[in-house]
Image: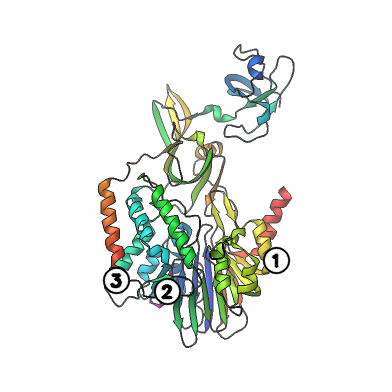
Amino acid sequence: VEKGVAPERDCFEVSLFGPGYGECVVVHLGLDDWIIVDSCLEPRSREPVALAYLKGIGVDTSRIALVAASHWDDDHICGISEVLRRARNARFVCSSAMASSEFKAVLSQWRPKSTIPGGSGIDEFDRVIAILADRSADTRYPTPQRAHAQSVLWERNDPPAEVRALSPSDAADTAAIAELAGIRNSDRGERRRLPHIEGNHTSVVMSIRAGTASVLLGADLQVRADRSLGWYAIIDRTANNARHETYKIAHHGSANADDDEIWDRLLIKNPLTTLTPFCRAGVLLPTCDDSERILRRSTRSYLTAPAVKRRYRARDYVVQKTIDEITLQSCVIPSGFGHVRLRKKLSGENWEGSCFGNALPLEQFVRQYCRRRKTKK
Amino acid sequence: MALQWEATQSGRATSDVLRQQDYRIFIPQRVEIGFRSRDDTVKIVPHREIGSKTAEASSFDVISAGPGFTTVVEVKPPRAHLQKQESAAAFTLLCKFDGVILRRNGSRFWARLWENPNDPEKLEAEFDMSELYGSEEKIAQEGTPIVWTIGYAIERGTRKRQSILYVRRVPPVSEEEALTSDRVVNEKMSRIRWKKE
């Protein structure tokens, strides 16, 4: 993680970290108030990137006001229990479906499966629950909050700042609970990792405003045909004047999380955008088509690492040869790690974007990787 | 590349067999590749598979035709020396991956694999279901733990590369474990005081 220099007290900062599989957003709301949304690990040190970054710029973890889990996918929660444990003054926020009896049943069923190598996939949440339960008797700790559409998660009066959840809607909560029930019913007691929850209905999209700065964090929310779900539920409930200057693009830039109405109703024209790649099981996001589509809407867009497959290098030649022969295709995860930092004075006009590590402007990604792929074809 | 294989030479494959498009024959042959000569496996494949990448496909396909010859031959590259999933008198382990199935897609699956869980980089690979040891196809699903060992099998003094990919067999969750887990989760969740709306 790039140490850099801590932002000044009157500076709004959005830092997006992404190692190719996972993401973490660290926001400075001015006056040394910080919030952390999601978590991933720094590939080398295996430390949560948010903690590594704040330590590097000399910010005490007591200044973290909010720790939010936008949804419960593996790529968004790695190390979040450690972040919460260290952030003693932070309120924990998650989707309301995660406090439901269905989720409790899933947690109960999968918890004993942590003995398998690599864990059960629910271990991180189990640790979060343990921390919250231990803190419940002590009034010094902020009470955790269930996020749903239009709930205010954090606010400050002077200078004004607000963190507001725009999702999930009531219908999305119901859909998420139905999905959890499906997972619970599919369990036959065998020890395996929790299957991927496909719908992303529980995704908590956040609108953050401080001074003249505003950012929309899109989590992994997708567009659904049913207007009571997904992005349409947000768009239909948001006032026309509530546009944002910057946008953390939803679901790694995939087409199923993009719609003209998001750009027209929730964002200013040509906003500053950031996104993280997703490289898992042969799926690479954003694709070249996704990148070109995003660039048509936002000329200033940054990607934390290129979404490319990197060849796995075994220590032993014979092992490498066998891998090449046995597998149909293979790659190494993560493919890169980077940090995109956006800064603006609370009363200012101009944004300053910086890239660290493998981060790069999306336009450069298209130029370097997509055009080369097209030429190869 | 000059390579020919005469179907009638072996006495085991005839032109009648070759006409059966769904039939595959693997016959050990001594083949000439350039200036080198080695024992290898010659595989006859149906015409329609030419050019398609299958789990068993070689890195190069050779087509030869003529009276009394096969129309299509495929030479498997050094995999002739690679044993898969066979027991051996002795085994030298070169590498052992633990892993988990990420996604199953028909007869193929993607898995994430690691030698050490704390490795900063992990291998993700796609396998054909036929690579799984024995008849484990039914129990292989998303989230199933797997193991992949690569090493040398030593039998009668001959060392051969061996790859074994298998599902890690772990006992199902016992009733006692389930009850304990249920009690712990209920106790913890009931203690959490969520902010009132």
Q: How far apart are marks 1 and 2 (CA)?
A: 34 Å
Residue A136 is marked as 3
Q: Is B35 on the left-hand or right-hand side of A141?
A: right
Residue B31 lies, in percent from the top left, at 63, 21
Q: Distance between the residues labelled 3 and 2?
A: 16 Å
Q: Distance between the residues labelled 1 and 3?
A: 48 Å
Q: What stretch is highlighted in magenta?
A: A62-71
Residue B86 location, quadrant:
top left
Residue A372 is marked as none
Kind of residue at badge 3:
Ser
On the same chain, marks 1 and 3? The answer is yes
Residue A269 lies, in percent from the top left, at 67, 75
Q: Is mark 3 on a helix, strand or loop?
A: loop
Label 3 near label 1: C-beta < 8 Å? no
Whether residue A335 is visible to the viewer of this picture, yes or no, is no
Q: Name the residue under label 2.
A: A66
Kind of residue at badge 2:
Leu
